[in-house]
Image (spheres, rainbow, N blue to C red):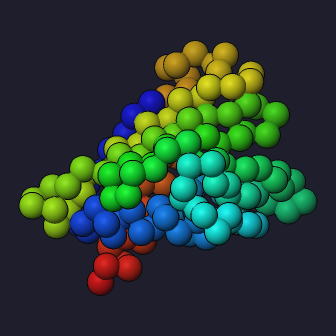
């Protein structure tokens, strides 16, 4: 499933939010808190330990950076507890001479029982969540740039 959003901030401003692992609880829908971020985040192999849900039904999980190209892209492998895992790729494309950014978010369920869900149903479930996540990411990038 792929979704995009134009952001009124340059790619480096958007990437600064992505590079701040502690901000994930503010923009990733379903992420209730960040527990720990490797000092090397967002270098490949670094980890972000987070929780999803509300106490007492909180689930602890981890997301690992698969690849990173500053101001251009970030690919993550997110664990989804017993449901499996997903690969998320965020790509930043400069617009209007670099003053704005097109953020493209692609997510694919890749492990465990979740990957057995038919693609159309995955898209129905992921689209609203990812649209709201991109809206929050945009707000943070624009706010930090102001």
Q: Nearer the viewer, residue 88 or 30?
A: 88
Name the outermost residue toward the right. Answer: 56
- Residue 79, above or below 63: above
- The answer to whether residue 26 shows anywhere in this view is no
For the point 60% across and 28% down, the residue is 109
Q: Nearer the viewer, residue 81 or 97?
A: 97
Q: Position of residue 30 (x, y in %)?
A: 65, 53
Q: Position of residue 140 (x, y in %)?
A: 42, 71
Q: Position of residue 67 (x, y in %)?
A: 49, 44
Residue 70, located in which quarter of the rendered image?
bottom left
State left or right for residue 62 relative to residue 19. Answer: right
In the rendered image, which quarter contains the C terminus? bottom left
State left or right for residue 25 relative to residue 74. Answer: right
Residue 79, located in which quarter of the rendered image?
top right
For the point 43% across and 37% down, the residue is 106
In the rendered image, which quarter contains the N terminus? top left
For the point 85% across and 62% down, the residue is 55
């Amino acid at each position: 499933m792929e979704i995009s959003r134009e952001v009124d901030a340059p790619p480096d401003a958007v990437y600064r939010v992505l590079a701040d692992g502690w901000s994930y609880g503010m923009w990733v829908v379903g992420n209730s808190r960040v527990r720990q971020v490797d000092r090397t985040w967002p270098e490949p192999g670094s980890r972000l330990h987070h929780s999803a849900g509300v106490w007492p039904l909180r689930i602890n999980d981890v997301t690992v950076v698969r690849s990173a190209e500053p101001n251009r892209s970030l690919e993550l492998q997110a664990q989804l507890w017993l449901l499996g895992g997903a690969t998320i790729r965020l790509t930043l494309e400069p617009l209007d001479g670099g003053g704005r950014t097109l953020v493209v978010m692609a997510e694919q369920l890749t492990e465990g029982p979740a990957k057995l869900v038919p693609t159309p149903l995955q898209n129905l479930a992921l689209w609203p969540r990812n649209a709201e996540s991109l809206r929050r990411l945009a707000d943070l990038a624009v706010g930090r740039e102001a």
